[in-house]
Image (tube, helix red, strand yellow):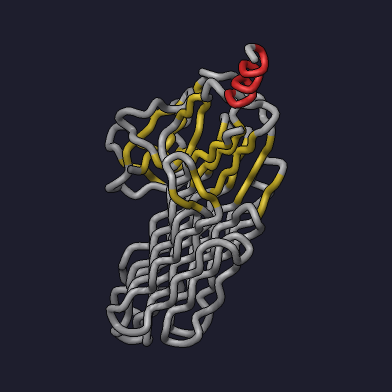
Amino acid sequence: MTAAVVDLQTLIVLNLIVADAATDPPPDGCELIDVTNGPPCNIGWVYDPTTGTFAPPVA
Amino acid sequence: MTTYVIALTSGTTWTVPSDWNNANNSVECIGGGGGGGNGLNGVGGGGGAYAKTSNITLTPGNNISIAIGAGGSGGVAAINAKPGSAGGNTTFNASAIKAAGGTGSGAGGTTSNSTGTVKNYGGNGGAAGSNNGGPGGGGAAGKNGAGANASVAPGNTGGAGATGDNATGGAGGTGGTGAGVPGNQGNPGAEFSTTTPGGTVGAGGGGGGGFGDGGVATSAGGAGGLYGAGGGAGGFASVGTAQPAGGAGSQGIIIITYVSTASTNTTNFFFMFR
């Protein structure tokens, strides 16, 4: 079980951790999104809450 | 005097036990390993870094925030080049202690991106080189030193993964030796004997690289061994055909060691009523 740690203000993925997004409490100011079976995600990518997907940062 | 060695491998909080000893403890972190790239110029994933701090002051009963860095995904099978993704950072008490994850571009987790009084580098994944075999993943750093760097593949056979923790951790997996024979997973480390949950844990060895002949005979890279090792890259197929996937990096870990204060209290109790 892999979770993306998403900053609630910037929606940037701060870390990828081993945690249960449904039961483990998120760090302050963050949300845990389950990415165990996708979608593709990487640290620094930006979360889109509308589609539930992640996109690389715009260069 | 009872010594506890606790391994944390998932979750976001840890509760300080009632017999926590501020004067005799250590917390050690290993970051997640990076994933290896697919066969088109893919590099091995970097190993996670190591960080340690001793005798930290904590309040029994308090919940401490933790993060166990996930292993990076291997680059997927595709015609185009697909690098692996980075391993996550492993942290304890916010980022009071932090071990950086290895990257998907070959570099191991660095000490400059880690926090602690003792820090060691994760090993680098092997470079793509000019041979068709995929390079292996980097070894995880550990308490005895840095993870080893993986080398370029020797030919069509995949390159070996690198050993973790200054040659005291898990050995690297061997490379794939033929079509459809993937690189082997790196071996797990065993430098720590834990009381919770029991067994051994440590810095893992990198995954072996996949086989490639530059044509259609290829195989995928192997996964990193537990904990914190990089995945091997896939072997090289001819351009325009599907390149085999890279191996995944392995997750990080936190190891907490402390001498219980309860044993001291028991001794005092004994002498009080003797």
Residue B213 figure quarter: bottom left
Locate residue A7, reporting x and y percent: 46, 30
The residue sitting at the front extreme is: B274
Locate residue B78, reporting x and y percent: 31, 68
Image quarter in which the N terminus of chain B is found: top right
- Numbered label tally: 0
Is B97 rendered above or below residue B48? above
Residue B81 figure quarter: bottom left
Locate residue B139, reporting x and y percent: 54, 63
Can I make out residue B103 in this image? no
Residue at the (55%, 55%) spot, across then down: B191
Residue at the (57%, 34%) spot, across then down: B2
Tell me: B1 left or right of B73.
right
Tell me: A55 left or right of B121.
left
Residue B73 figure quarter: bottom left
Is A25 rendered above or below residue A45? above
Q: Which of B232 and B66 is in front in this view?
A: B66
Residue at the (49%, 80%) spot, across then down: B153
Locate residue B7, reporting x and y percent: 48, 42
Can I make out residue B73 in this image? yes
Residue at the (59%, 68%) spot, across then down: B149
Image quarter in which the C terminus of chain B is found: top right
